[in-house]
Amino acid sequence: MLKDKKAAIFDLDGTLVDSMWIWGDVDVEYLGKRGMKVPADLQKAVEGLAFTDVAVYFKERFKLEDSIEEIKDEWNQMAMDKYLNEVPLKDGVKPFLQYLQDRGIVMGVASSNSVQLVKAVLDVHGILPFFSCVLTCCEVERGKPEPDVYLEVAKRLKVEPKNCIVFEDIPIGLTAGNSANMETCAVEDSYSMVYEQEKRQMASYYIRSYHDIINGTFEVL
């Protein structure tokens, strides 16, 4: 998997940390305060969107009076405590990051989340120093499934796309990595189990734990 690779680029939620469950809770609480219920199609509608784009979607769909910045600030406040205290790392993350560092492979994060939450959860788990670049989709022209965020991270890491491997947990993210002409590894996550077969069709590799890579037990697809 790591042959000829000079950079590893990771999504955050569902890939480095087990956090996908948080946003369903935030949606229920946020809309509930405003006397609304969460529509059945909401998660699918916003999946993969940049944090700012989700706020725009909410403002338009639910006719919210708050500004985009006010919406984002409230979400950050609602989610921050959970990210700092309730969100664990995915299995094997820390030893795998050390494994990459020991081999001279540089690392970056390319997330659709807010930069405040991304850096906070990486920092609280002591893994922020592993990453030479932390970038969000709000900082590029187009979010996932477009390749922009992955291409920009590779550019900042000074590594050609062909020498990068992307770790993602949902199909939209794998599409972004593939579109950037990078090899992709699908990471198992309970939230996205419904997409398992689709992920296997899209990615070059599949792992249930990062220990799979260290131990050489990952699946080649």
Image: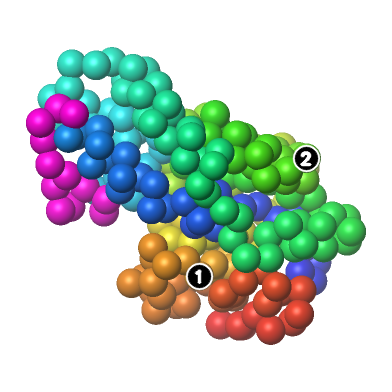
Q: Position of residue 60 (x, y in %)?
A: 18, 28
Query: In the image, what residue type sits under mark 2?
Result: Pro
For the residues marked 2 and 1, what is the alpha-carbon distance in whole angstroms?
25 Å
Which residue is found at the position 47% from the left and 51% from the top?
19
Q: Secondary structure under badge 1?
A: loop
Quadrant into which the C terminus falls:
bottom right
Residue 179's place in the image compared with 146, above or below, is below
Which residue is found at the position 18% from the left and 16% from the top?
65
Q: Position of residue 112 (x, y in %)?
A: 47, 41
Q: Which residues are magenta?
A: 33-44
The kind of secondary structure the magenta stretch mainly shows is loop
Toward the viewer: 94 or 197?
94
* Residue 136 visible at all: no
Query: In the image, what residue type sits under mark 1?
Result: Glu
10 Å crowding of disc 1: few (<14), some (14-19), many (20+):
many
Q: Which residue is mark 2?
A: 129
Examine the structure image and report whether residue 54 is included in the region drawn in magenta: no
Residue 2's place in the image compared with 156, above or below, is below
Toward the viewer: 154 or 123?
123
Q: Which residue is mark 1?
A: 188
Toward the viewer: 176 or 65?
65
Q: Quadrant of residue 25?
A: top left
Which residue is found at the position 15% from the left and 27% from the top?
34
Q: Position of residue 67 (x, y in %)?
A: 28, 15
Question: Of all residues shown, which one is farthest toward the front?
Answer: 85
**In-image side of 189 versus 4 (left or right):** left
